[in-house]
């Protein structure tokens, strides 16, 4: 019987090694699939937690684009799907940007029992008079009996004046009611301040008087940013970006609508004033 051959090294079979490699590959595949599933679950959870993109977000996004363009010295593009056919009143270069339904309110007493006598405002209705008796006419005579009756109601607050249609242009706004259309140029406006989403307070004056009202409408913030670009670049709500909800710029970017803020005004503290002599 022949003995084992000399000079030959006997190696163990490769079966165990092959099995080990295959098992490792299987575990790697399982780990990769679990990691992918975990990543997908995390992405889904983040998407579910993120507020959805709404129509109001589109309004703010377009308003932000107008601010970016206007601050860069470019004429903004119209941003409203529907723009009313209002003829411009403020010279060449005016561009209508947006139209929307709105509500007008005035700070006053009573429950609308205080109505000035009819006078000047296109068709001469009470809405126009209440808003423009001083601003555009100064000729309305208040009925004393109605004033006394309204004075009995001591509560003063913002009260509904009228439903309106507002068109915003690069040069001013146009307030339309059943009585007609009243143009208000930005050059006549002394104050615009946001008091909530889609809500601003405006004050205007000319040689004939002053008027102050609250306007609620989809494009209210558009009026604020346009007026600030022209007449108050340091407006605190524009500089501080508080005309937008807190965190909205991050919300826009997360939903695929980044905003170019490179031209927006930024807070820069004034140097200390010189001491008085």
Image: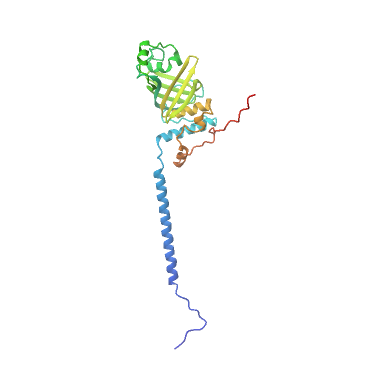
Q: Which quarter of the figure has residue 166?
A: top left
Locate residue 59, reporting x and y percent: 43, 33
Residue drawn at x 44%, y 69% is 18
The outermost residue toward the bottom is 1
248 lies above or below 18: above
Q: Nearer the viewer, residue 23 or 277?
A: 277
Q: Nearer the viewer, residue 36 or 205?
A: 205
Locate residue 188, reporting x and y percent: 49, 20
Locate residue 236, reporting x and y percent: 51, 30
Q: Nearer the viewer, residue 50 or 172?
A: 50
Indicate the colouring scheme: rainbow
Q: How many marks?
A: 0
Position of the N terminus by quadrant: bottom left
272 lies above or below 212: below
Locate residue 51, reporting x and y percent: 40, 40
Residue 114 can be seen, yes or no: no
Residue drawn at x 45%, y 15% is 134
211 lies above or below 226: above
| Horizontal relation, residue 276 to residue 166: left or right | right
Position of the C terminus by quadrant: top right
Residue 221 can be seen, yes or no: yes
The outermost residue toward the front is 277
């Amino acid at each position: 019987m022949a003995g084992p051959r000399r000079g030959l090294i006997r190696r163990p079979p490769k079966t165990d090694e092959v099995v080990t490699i295959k098992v490792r590959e299987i575990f790697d595949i399982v780990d990769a699939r679990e990691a992918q599933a975990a990543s997908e679950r995390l992405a889904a959870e983040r998407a579910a937690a993120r507020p959805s993109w709404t129509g109001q977000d589109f309004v703010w996004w377009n308003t932000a684009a107008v601010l970016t363009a206007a601050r860069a010295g470019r004429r903004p593009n119209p941003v409203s799907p529907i723009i009313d056919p209002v003829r411009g009143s403020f010279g060449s270069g005016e561009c209508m940007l947006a139209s929307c339904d709105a509500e007008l309110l005035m700070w006053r007493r009573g429950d609308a029992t205080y109505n000035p006598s009819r006078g000047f405002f296109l068709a001469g209705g009470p809405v126009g008079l209440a808003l423009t008796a001083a601003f555009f006419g100064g000729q309305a005579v208040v009925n004393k009996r109605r004033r006394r009756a309204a004075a009995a109601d001591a509560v003063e607050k913002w009260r509904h004046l009228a439903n309106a249609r507002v068109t915003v242009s690069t040069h001013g706004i146009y307030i339309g009611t059943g009585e007609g259309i009243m143009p208000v140029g930005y050059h006549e406006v002394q104050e615009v301040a946001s008091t909530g989403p889609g809500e601003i307070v405006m004050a205007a004056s000319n040689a004939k008087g002053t008027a102050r009202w609250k306007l609620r409408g989809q494009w209210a913030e558009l009026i604020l940013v346009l007026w600030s670009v022209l007449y108050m670049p340091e407006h605190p709500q524009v500089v501080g970006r508080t005309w937008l909800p807190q965190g909205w710029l991050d919300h826009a970017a997360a939903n695929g609508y980044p905003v170019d803020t490179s031209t927006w005004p930024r807070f820069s503290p004034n140097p200390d004033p010189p001491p008085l002599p």
